[in-house]
Amino acid sequence: MATSYTYHFTSSPLNLLVLAWFFGCVACQIRPGSQLLASENIAWDSENGTFAFGFTSLDSNERLQLGIWFAQLPGDRVVVWSANRDNPVGKDAVLEFHNTGNLLVTAGNTTVWTSNTSGAGAETAVMAETGNFILYNANLRTVWQSFSHPSDTLLPGQPLTASLELTSKQSASNSGYHALKMLQQPTSLNLALSYNLPESYDQSSDAYTNYSYWYGPDISNVTGEVVAVLDNAGSFGIVYGDSSSGAVYIYKNNRDDSGLASAPNETIRSSVLRRLVLETNGNLRLYRWDDDMNGSRQWVPEWAAVSNPCGIAGICGNGICNLERSKTNSSCTCLPGTSNKAGDNDQCSENSGLTGKCNAQHENLTSDFEIITVQQTNYYFSQDSIIANYSDNRTVSKCGDACLSDCECVASVYGLSEEKLYCWVLRSLDFGGFQDPSATLFVKVQSNWSASYNGEDAPNSGHSDSESEDRRNKILVLPIALTMGVLFGLLCGFGSVFKGSLGDGTLIAVKKLERVLPHGEKEFITEVNTIGSMHHMNLVRLCGYCSEGQYR
């Protein structure tokens, strides 16, 4: 016999709206005892069929996830929420809305996922037209909703509070992932994109296990909740205050006249489909569905948080990101002592060749290691990975020597920031590197590394000799081309040459430059760095330089 329910409401317009919608969609209501079988192609749809809730393929027909997707669009399903993407199931899985009010995904005798709502009074489930799957109690109060447990996608009207985060799918090669969340600063909140290391890393310090590479505007001196939200008009930003009265745009759609403040309270879906996605590569991108884009129906990108792909930490694992000529695409080069896992061209990972271990007496074993120079390359690193900063090293090669002489060091970075020299000595290489003409990276490897592999990629990289040569050329062409120009600029410029000697008796030639480099301190240091890291039988090695006022 069917159970009857009595609902009590106040007479506010909002409650009347909810009441009219709820009872107007009897067919959308899911009752306790309902099930979905992964072996059947059946889902629970929203009222107008915009969204569906059920089992869908993760990456093949054999690996399934419980998710929400756009149900009426052509092509592959675009999933906007997943309960178990990192723990897929097979076709023997079952979703049950249990009589206790709990949502359960089971595979055999194993519980794979649960909403943890037993005893919370959930009596009805609804797949809403907004893309939110909701459990209601007898008073139509929300007991659980998918909007409060986001995956990698934010839909219009879905609030991302300070306690929530978007997370990208984990990298197949090293299990690292990217996240979008609010970060608490000393005096403010920031919405930030971060790259997070695999859980197998030391979790004793959050500063060590993640690196933030993009920040939204500072939110300070506010009361009430701070929420990031995408509105129905396609604008993305942050609302704050006791009644969401304040708003800061991160991206504003030119056709948005309503403003962000009302976005967290929107319950009606816009006629234009949009989604904000934290992609596997670490970029945050806004898409709009276009029914007539050059004669086809497809998702069209409207905005991205990061325009330069190499500005994303971890995009190459711990390898080096190389920006292509298009400025929108990039390729990856693994560091000396590292390799690709499982032949993944876009991710590099550490192996035993890259090490800076000390012996039992914490002594340095300098003879066991050597330094490999990676020109015009900088690196993302956390504060916890810093051993020291030797800003008084005026010579490029000394920065490499500083790493070689420190048993904990695995690499050092030399360059110029805000007209100041730096030499960061690092104990770890985790977050990836990028091309930077003003910096030089020194990587410590085992002394037999280059001899054993003759400068080729580390073993098990999955590349042939011709592929390795091609990959090395990608990173070497730019430094060589720039170096020739630098040499003609410095060595062939106007100036007088003097003979001199160092304190140890070494004879040197000193050239005083005149009217050669009017570009400023940064450009001069960049060119000196390039020459200082070069070694060739027909070149005299650069021992040092002077840059003081107008004198070079």
Image (cartoon, rainbow, N blue to C red):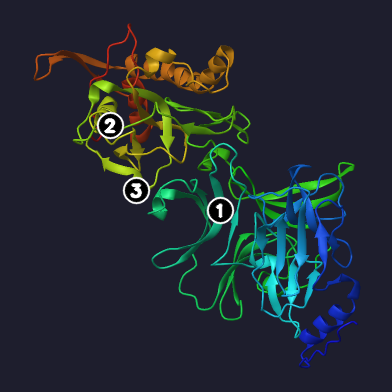
Query: In terms of secondary structure, where does tag 1 sit?
Result: strand
Q: Residue at x 53, y 43 (%)?
A: 312
Q: Position of residue 451 (x, y in %)?
A: 38, 13
Q: Earlier in the sequence, mark 3 or mark 1?
A: 1
Identify residue type, mark 2. Cys
The reply to whether callout 3 and callout 1 are in contact (CB within 8 Å) is no
Identify residue type, mark 1. Ala
- Whole-Å distance between the Cαs marked 3 and 2? 16 Å
Q: Within 10 angstroms of label 3, few (less than 14), some, or many (20 or more) residues?
A: some
- Whole-Å distance between the Cαs marked 2 and 1? 32 Å
Identify residue type, mark 3. Asp
Query: In terms of secondary structure, where does tag 3 sit?
Result: helix
Q: Residue at x 46, y 70 (%)?
A: 220
Q: Residue furthest top?
A: 538
The reply to whether callout 2 and callout 1 are in contact (CB within 8 Å) is no
Of residues 62 and 193, which is closer to you in this image?
62
Q: Is residue 136 left or right of residue 544?
A: right
- Image quarter (top left, top right, bottom left or bottom right) of the C terminus: top left
Asked whether residue 182 appears in the rendered view, the answer is yes
Eyeballing the image, is 511 above or below 269?
Answer: above
Q: Position of residue 473 (x, y in %)?
A: 52, 18
Asked whether residue 157 appears in the rendered view, the answer is no
Q: Is residue 281 left or right of residue 360?
A: right
Of residues 128 and 53, which is closer to you in this image?
53
Eyeballing the image, is 369 above or below 102?
Answer: above
Q: Which residue is mark 2?
A: 403
Q: Which residue is mark 1?
A: 179
Q: Earlier in the sequence, mark 3 or mark 2?
A: 3
Q: Residue at x 34, y 29 (%)?
A: 524
Q: Which residue is mark 3?
A: 384
Report the disc number at residue 166.
Answer: none
Q: Earlier in the sequence, mark 2 or mark 1?
A: 1
